[in-house]
């Protein structure tokens, strides 16, 4: 793999992360528990879609084969998607969406903080924009975890169940593959294993404050970066890509 | 959920202006919702949220006693007074 191909793959996978979680959040549009939260969730969704667009555009530019951001989003199949699995999990109920969001926000704040130091100026620029968004996302999701975890008996049990279900997907966040290591080695990418202590501190402190029990680590689920996905991604892409697959090249 | 009134300052140096209301579970959430609902297009540099129930407001039936007595007191307006010719630059 040339350096150019490696950079393309690296930017592409970060785009996949952003697009899929943005899509999952957008599924709340008009289904939020109330109007204000509906708007807040879709605002976050738009931040993610915006980030995906920036990353895909840059990936297309690096690849330099005439593909566009839309080609990358709409014309790749599930095995070609290289996102971390936690981003593709179904939106679930509100507790599940919030729990996933908190775990991802806590990761993103560290990840994009590091990536903003990237030797690649475009990645560094995208990352420093993202950090500001992440700070707000984290403020929101952490707040909700505290309120619902330490809320009523029902909200607590839903949050604990969500945490138990999602926790197994968090280890993948800190498991670098060959490409991660290569990009970290040339100071373009992030050594994700180094992010884990800070993430753990924040997550453990928040869970404790929210009266939630941290699940055990003996159930890691890994595969997204290699294109091995959960059963949920196919359904997501079927919806996301339907128009472009049915009417190729269709424009607004 | 409680109702909150939202006040936004659009630029430095200007006053906060009332721009609407929203429902939220806690004051912190009300502030975040205000940000998401009312400043999505760069409308503000500062937000206040106030519980609507904490606002003491005059009532319709107060109008007679509050405002009517002012109608017949023109001397409370500066225009009531004629300015002597000698006074310049007032």
Image (cartoon, rainbow, N blue to C red):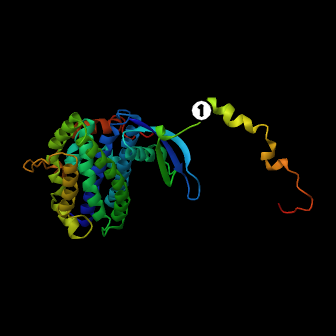
Q: Is residue A116 visible?
A: yes
Image x and y of residue A42, in percent: 38, 42
The residue closer to the viewer here, A74 or B82, is B82
Q: Nearer the viewer, residue A155 or B11?
A: A155
The quarter of the picture where the C terminus of chain A appears is top left
Residue found at x 44% / y 47%: B35
Looking at the image, residue A85 sits to the left or right of residue A69; the answer is left
Residue for point 72% across, 34% down: B68
Residue ranking furthest to the top: B61
User: Which residue ends up furthest to the right in the rendered image?
Assistant: B85
Q: Quadrant of the N terminus of chain A?
A: bottom left
Does residue B30 appear left or right of residue B65 in this picture? left
Quarter of the image where one finds residue A37:
top left
Q: Residue at x 48, y 45 (%)?
A: B38
Q: Between residues A163 and A4, which one lies in front from this camera angle? A: A163
The residue located at (36%, 60%) in the rendering is A126
Position in image of residue B41 (x %, y %):
50, 48
Viewed as shown, does residue A58 lie left or right of A107?
right
Q: Nearer the viewer, residue A188 or B69?
A: B69
């Amino acid at each position: 793999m040339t350096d150019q191909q490696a950079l393309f793959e690296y930017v592409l996978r970060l785009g996949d992360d952003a697009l899929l979680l943005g899509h999952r959040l957008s599924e709340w549009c008009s289904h939020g528990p109330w109007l204000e939260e509906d708007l807040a969730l879709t605002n976050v969704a738009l931040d993610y879609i915006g980030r995906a667009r920036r990353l895909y555009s840059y990936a297309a530019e690096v690849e330099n084969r005439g593909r566009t951001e839309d080609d990358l989003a709409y014309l790749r199949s599930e095995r070609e998607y290289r996102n971390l699995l936690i981003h593709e999990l179904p939106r679930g109920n509100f507790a599940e969406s919030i729990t996933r969001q908190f775990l991802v926000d806590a990761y993103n704040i560290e990840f994009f903080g590091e990536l903003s130091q990237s030797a690649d100026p475009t990645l560094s620029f995208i990352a420093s924009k993202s950090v500001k968004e992440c700070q707000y996302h984290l403020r929101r999701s952490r707040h909700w975890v505290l309120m619902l975890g330490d809320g009523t008996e029902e909200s607590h049990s839903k949050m604990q169940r969500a945490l138990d279900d999602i926790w197994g997907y968090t280890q993948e966040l800190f498991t670098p593959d060959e490409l991660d290591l290569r990009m970290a080695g040339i100071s373009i990418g992030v050594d994700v294993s180094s992010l884990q202590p800070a993430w753990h501190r924040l997550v453990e402190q928040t869970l404790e404050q929210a009266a939630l029990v941290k699940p055990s680590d003996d159930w890691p689920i890994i595969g997204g970066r290699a294109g091995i996905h959960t059963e949920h991604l196919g359904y997501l892409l079927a919806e996301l890509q339907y128009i472009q697959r049915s009417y190729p090249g269709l424009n607004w | 959920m409680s109702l909150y009134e939202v006040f936004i300052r659009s630029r430095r140096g200007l006053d906060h202006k009332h721009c609407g209301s929203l429902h939220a579970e806690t004051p912190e959430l009300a502030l975040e919702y205000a940000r998401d609902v009312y400043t999505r297009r760069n409308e503000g540099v500062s937000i206040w949220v106030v519980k609507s129930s904490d606002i003491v407001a005059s009532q319709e039936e107060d109008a007679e006693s509050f405002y009517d007595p002012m109608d017949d007191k023109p001397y409370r307006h500066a225009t009531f007074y004629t300015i002597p010719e000698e006074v310049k630059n007032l």
